[in-house]
Image: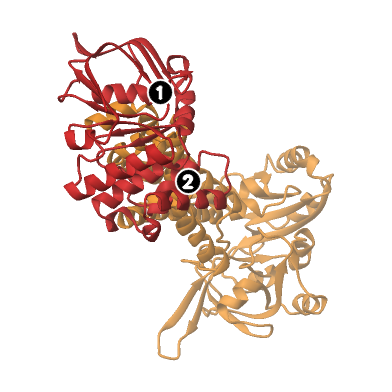
């Protein structure tokens, strides 16, 4: 099977003034379609940087990033934006919903980039919200939702365009234990029933237990791998 | 579009204040344009086929009435009429005591010849005949008639400011005709009466006239005829200066100084202020939403999309300002016929060109003030923005 993620000697260096910060050091990795990966490691180990590189939000200093069959290093900024819209869904720690939009409008937002009629967009958004169990909160604004519900709306937004890959950066970081459990169960269900490839960055070992494979980064180097 | 609108509603007070600021500026712009238009109205209503002959030194010096027949013999002339600025003040007693005073342009003219030279003036044949027969009759514009509440047969009394009457009383006239015009720029607040009446009643200036209105057979003969008339009297004590009717009317505008420049300067300052207000609001709005811009980019919006979003918001604010300010002023002046000084501003309208300019200014202001925040959002590195906020 062709891997959905194929990294070869991926290196990322940030420059601050005259100093260089080596964030990722020759990371090589392959992820098969349908996998559920937990990316762990201490703060500053390069987890979020790796996630951003996988999602085409950042470019590597060296090495190859092949995601969903596309070498991301050859794409322009505009092509990367288009590629993200079609292939990747992002979930963030602090939900990052647009406060002026309702749950349904937030989910519809990435769909505006697709060649769909407004009725089709509305339908897709409603399906995504049903999948995350929020069909009764569609017309609520983020300020009217709990943290767990907001994160589920964010997951619905990530799912709306039916991407192959879901990237979640600390998706339970801002949630209480119960909501965190619900969100992780939802992600697991999406992985198992819809076959989505999911990569989460987390500090939480309990959240990591939902994944089928754990990757550990330390000082930009992939150290340990554990399969369940 | 809906996202632009929703973002504008995010801080309704801030948006409303910015729209209000823009609206005030554009309303002021339209008002200034209407004032400029009113000052230029005299020049606008001038005809290219009419000349005015005045004293070479100044309009305050009079010309002999005997010049009329000599001017009339110059090749290329269709007709000549005496026109003397009367400058009387309309007075009427008020029921509660005191007097109502109104000022409007009033002239003594050779009525028959004058009306032949001004085809813009439209009078019914019956009123025309009646006007010619009555030595104390006068002709007034329909807008003036409406303002004074006068109709045909009513009396008008003018207190002389330049031409005292022999008996020391005000000059009395009877409205014999009310004109309208087929030209939108022709002043419909004028009053003209028979020069003979002035001649008979005035204390001084007998045998003299303020100026001559000259009609040309062809507008192309302007230069030759002007030269020919001025040559006729070049060696006399009352040498003449002949100019186009437009140039003559422009003299009065130039007497007020360079109003156009002053108004344009005020307009520019107002627009620049508006630009600063709008740009400041958009900068604040853009800075507050750096994270949102990063999120939009993460979910697939391109640099162009976020730029368009911010510039679009800015243009939307400016266009709302245009609707409230410029269109509001247009409605007030052009549709509701508000005029702050009807006796001074006889033609007071926001010109269509000013509305187009105001729309252009609104769009340009939106573009310029949205450009910097839009550019910042476009250049925003989503990964860095998400990490740093």
Residue B95 lies, in percent from the top left, at 45, 91
Residue B51 lies, in percent from the top left, at 71, 49
Left or right placement of residue B158 versus residue B18 in this view = right
Rendered image coloring scheme = by chain
**B331 in relation to B200, above or below:** above
**Residue under label 2:** B362
Identify the chain of the residue marked 2, using the numbered disc in the image: B
Determine which of the numbered discs, if any, sits on residue B265 in the image.
Answer: none
Q: Secondary structure at mark 1?
A: loop
| Corner quadrant of residue A73 | top left
CA–CA distance between discs 2 and 1? 55 Å
Left or right placement of residue A140 versus residue B205 in this view = left
Left or right placement of residue B369 versus residue B153 in this view = left
**Residue under label 1:** A32
User: Residue farthest to the front?
Assistant: A228
The hue used for chain B is orange
Residue B26 lies, in percent from the top left, at 45, 52
**A12 in relation to B87, above or below:** above
Residue occupying image coordinates x 55% and y 61% = B348
Residue toward you, B124 or B19: B19
User: Residue farthest to the left?
Assistant: A42
Residue occupying image coordinates x 80% and y 40% = B220
Q: Residues within 10 Å of mark 2 (few under 14, many from 20)?
A: many
**A84 in relation to A63, above or below:** below
The hue used for chain A is red
Nearer to us: label 2 or label 1: 1
Residue occupying image coordinates x 34% and y 44% = A154
Q: Secondary structure at mark 2?
A: helix
């Amino acid at each position: 099977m062709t891997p959905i993620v194929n990294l070869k000697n991926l290196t990322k260096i940030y420059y601050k003034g005259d100093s260089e910060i080596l964030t990722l050091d020759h990371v090589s990795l392959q992820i098969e379609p349908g996998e559920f990966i937990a990316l762990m490691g201490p703060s500053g180990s390069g987890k979020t940087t790796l996630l951003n590189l996988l999602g085409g939000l950042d470019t590597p200093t060296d090495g190859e990033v092949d995601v969903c069959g596309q070498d991301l290093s050859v794409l322009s900024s505009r092509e990367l934006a288009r590629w993200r819209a079609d292939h990747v869904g992002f979930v963030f720690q602090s939900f990052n919903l647009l406060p002026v939009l309702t749950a349904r409008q937030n989910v519809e937002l990435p769909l505006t980039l697709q060649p769909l009629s407004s009725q089709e967009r509305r339908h897709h958004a409603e399906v995504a919200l049903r999948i995350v169990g929020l069909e009764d909160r569609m017309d609520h604004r983020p300020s009217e939702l709990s943290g767990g519900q907001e994160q589920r709306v964010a997951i619905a937004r990530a799912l709306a365009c039916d991407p192959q890959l879901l990237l979640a950066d600390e998706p339970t970081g801002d949630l209480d234990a119960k909501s965190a459990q619900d969100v992780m169960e939802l992600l697991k269900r999406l992985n198992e029933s819809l076959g989505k490839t999911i990569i989460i960055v987390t500090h939480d070992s309990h959240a990591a237990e939902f994944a089928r494979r754990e990757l550990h980064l330390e000082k930009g180097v992939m150290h340990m791998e554990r399969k369940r | 579009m809906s996202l632009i609108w929703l973002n504008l509603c995010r801080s309704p007070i801030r948006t409303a204040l910015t729209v209000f600021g823009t609206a005030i500026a554009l309303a002021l712009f339209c008002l200034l344009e209407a004032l400029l238009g009113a000052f230029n109205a005299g020049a606008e209503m001038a005809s290219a086929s009419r000349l005015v002959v005045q004293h070479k030194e100044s309009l305050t010096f009079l010309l002999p009435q005997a010049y009329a027949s000599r001017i009339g013999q110059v090749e290329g002339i269709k007709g000549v009429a005496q026109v003397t600025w009367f400058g009387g003040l309309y007075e009427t007693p008020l029921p509660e005591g005191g007097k109502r005073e109104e000022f409007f342009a009033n002239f003594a003219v050779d009525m028959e010849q004058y009306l032949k030279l001004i085809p813009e003036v439209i009078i019914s044949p019956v009123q025309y005949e009646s006007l010619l027969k009555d030595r104390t009759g006068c002709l007034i514009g329909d807008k003036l008639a409406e303002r004074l509440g006068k109709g045909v047969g009513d009396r008008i009394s003018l207190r002389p400011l330049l031409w005292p009457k022999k008996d020391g009383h005000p000059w009395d006239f009877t409205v014999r005709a009310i004109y309208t015009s087929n030209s939108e720029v022709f002043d419909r607040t004028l009053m003209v009466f028979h020069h003979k009446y002035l001649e008979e009643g005035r204390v001084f200036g007998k045998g003299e006239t303020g100026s001559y209105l000259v009609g040309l057979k062809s507008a192309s003969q302007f230069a030759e005829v002007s030269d020919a008339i001025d040559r006729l009297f070049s060696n006399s004590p009352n040498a003449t200066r002949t100019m186009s009717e437009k140039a003559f009317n422009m003299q009065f505008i130039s007497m007020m100084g360079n109003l156009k420049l002053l108004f344009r300067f005020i307009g520019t300052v107002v627009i620049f202020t508006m630009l600063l207000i709008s740009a400041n609001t958009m900068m604040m709005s853009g800075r507050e939403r750096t994270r949102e811009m990063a999120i939009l980019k993460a979910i697939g919006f391109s640099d162009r999309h976020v730029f368009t979003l911010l510039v679009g918001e800015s243009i939307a604010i400016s266009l709302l300002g245009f609707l409230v300010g410029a269109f509001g002023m247009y409605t007030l002046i052009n549709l509701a016929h508000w005029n702050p000084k009807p006796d001074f501003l006889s033609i007071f309208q926001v010109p269509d060109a000013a509305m187009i300019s105001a729309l252009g200014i609104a769009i340009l202001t939106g573009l310029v003030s949205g450009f910097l925040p839009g550019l910042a959002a476009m250049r925003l590195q989503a990964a860095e923005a998400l990490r740093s906020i």
